[in-house]
């Protein structure tokens, strides 16, 4: 049986209600926002019916507008007096947010047919989305031990409806992990809303997160639904949470504790049902010690924790990832590139990848677009300097390099005191001088 949510500030016409029920609908009626949100949390609706009996002020009742705007995954059908369509505000909302509309007086048969079509279209959209996920699912590429452990951990965490903190260096795929958690959770049919806390000016981020009422700011010409409210029924991803201004950390903590928000300039408490997934590349423990991040917020976010490994830690995954990106970009751009030269493969395996997977992806994309050969070289990847380092090192060269590093470290540690450096290296002063001369290392005058 299909389920239908009806939003109305007045009693529903009994004959109309009976006709809808007879068409195999389970009907739930809400006459305020709190009741509507409670029903939306308990039931899975594909279609919603919003009913207006009048629009004397030329505006839709605010609570009905809020519910419609914050649940775009439903196919909304509007019933209203014909005069209401003359209102720019109402006409705009209907055009942007509704599947269809009917004007009073209602033709029950036509309305029931529209509701059936709306529900059917949403069901078709869901099947199409599910099929796309099955054929092109979000996934992490790699078969190294750390990646196998990570995938197992994500699968376990996804089914637990708790806040998650994802840590790791820049470019390791923290947002991809967050999307995987959402995709494998019970909220996968709901929205996934992502916001980068470092990308928004401090003056705008509060309104972007919590929304604002009309007139809250000089330029606030209409009500705005914030990111948190838009994530109702789904997941909210807060990237670079360590850059969230201290003044907003209190607001976010309150939301996590109470599950409610207030829009900027508003006084109504709005219940929100969303799962928060936060990510950071900075050490929040250090930020807490420096009083830049609230300790209580940290523990609220860090209920479940995932650490994304750097590319350097993923033994054997570099070649697999490089081939994955090569195939993806050559197919996307119809490129004749077939693979990598041996030298390029060696360079990639020895390169440190400070930008991790994101850096690899960008280097290979650029190389595919600009390459003039069928196999990418270190020059194509802009890793020419690393090509020299990629050449096999002889045992003698390795020993020489290690000796030089040890000499430098001992001198720095002893502040270039020759006697102390010799004792630390467990050699005589004469031997130390010979080694310094061999490696062309100078010692400041006046040292002993």
Image (cartoon, rainbow, N blue to C red):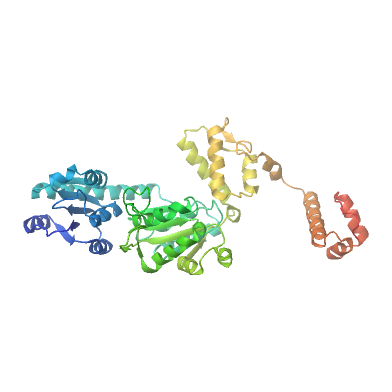
Query: Which is nearer the eye, 114 or 60?
Result: 60
Outermost residue, right direction?
430
- Position of 113 relative to 414 (above/below): above
Outermost residue, left direction?
15
How far across and how far down the image is residue 272, in percent? 33, 62
How far across and how far down the image is residue 43, in percent? 24, 62
Q: Is residue 32 visible?
A: yes
Outermost residue, front direction?
218
Q: Residue visible at 68% across and 41% down?
A: 387
Query: Which is nearer the eye, 27 or 283?
Result: 283
Q: Residue visible at 25% across and 59% down?
A: 44
Answer left or right for 210 relative to 49.
right
Answer left or right for 80 relative to 309.
left
Which quadrant does the C terminus fall into? Answer: bottom right
Q: Quadrant of residue 6?
A: bottom left
How far across and how far down the image is residue 78, in percent? 18, 49
Q: Is residue 160 visible?
A: no
Query: Which is nearer the eye, 420 or 69?
Result: 69
Q: Quadrant of residue 20?
A: bottom left
Answer left or right for 180 relative to 44.
right
Q: Residue visible at 27% across and 44% down?
A: 96
How far across and how far down the image is residue 394, in percent? 77, 48
Q: Residue visible at 50% across and 51% down?
A: 141
């Amino acid at each position: 049986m299909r389920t239908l949510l009806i939003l109305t500030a007045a009693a529903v016409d009994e004959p109309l209600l009976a006709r809808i029920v007879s068409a195999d609908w389970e009907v739930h009626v809400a006459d305020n926002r709190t009741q509507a949100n409670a029903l939306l949390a308990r039931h899975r609706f594909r279609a919603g019916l919003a009913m207006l009996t009048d629009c004397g002020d030329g505006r839709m009742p605010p609570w009905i507008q809020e519910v419609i705007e914050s649940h775009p995954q439903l196919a909304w059908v509007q019933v209203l007096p014909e005069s209401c369509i003359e209102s720019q505000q109402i006409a705009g909302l209907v055009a942007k947010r509704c599947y269809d509309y009917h004007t009073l007086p209602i033709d029950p048969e036509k309305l029931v047919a529209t509701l059936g079509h709306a529900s059917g279209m949403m069901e078709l959209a869901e099947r199409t989305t599910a099929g796309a996920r099955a054929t092109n699912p979000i996934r992490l590429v790699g078969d190294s031990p750390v990646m196998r452990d990570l995938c197992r951990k994500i699968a376990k965490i996804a089914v637990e409806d708790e806040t998650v903190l994802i840590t790791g260096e820049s470019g390791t795929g923290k947002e991809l992990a967050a999307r995987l958690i959402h995709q494998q959770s019970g909220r996968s049919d709901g929205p996934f809303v992502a916001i980068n806390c470092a990308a928004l000016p401090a003056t705008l981020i509060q309104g972007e997160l919590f929304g604002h009422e009309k007139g809250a700011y000089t330029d606030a010409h209409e009500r705005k639904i914030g990111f948190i409210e838009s994530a109702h029924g789904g997941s909210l991803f807060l990237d670079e949470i360590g850059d969230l201004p201290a003044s907003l950390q209190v607001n976010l903590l309150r939301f996590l504790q109470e599950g409610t928000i207030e829009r900027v300039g508003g006084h109504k408490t709005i219940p929100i049902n969303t799962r928060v997934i936060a990510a950071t590349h900075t050490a929040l423990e250090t930020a807490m010690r420096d009083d830049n991040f609230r300790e209580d917020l940290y523990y609220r976010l860090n209920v479940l924790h995932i650490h994304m490994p750097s590319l350097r830690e993923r033994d054997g995954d570099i070649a697999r990832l490089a081939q994955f990106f090569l195939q993806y970009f050559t197919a996307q751009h119809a490129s004749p590139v077939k693979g990598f030269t041996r030298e390029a493969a060696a360079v990639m395996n020895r390169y440190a990848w400070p930008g991790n997977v994101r850096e690899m992806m960008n280097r290979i994309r650029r190389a595919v677009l600009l390459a003039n050969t069928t196999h990418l070289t270190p020059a194509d990847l802009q890793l020419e300097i690393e090509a020299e380092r990629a050449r096999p090192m002889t045992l003698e060269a390795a020993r020489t390099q290690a000796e030089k590093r040890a000499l430098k470290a001992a001198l720095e540690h002893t502040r270039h005191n020759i006697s102390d450096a010799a004792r630390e290296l467990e050699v005589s002063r004469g031997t130390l001088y010979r080694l310094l001369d061999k490696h062309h290392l100078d010692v400041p005058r006046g040292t002993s």
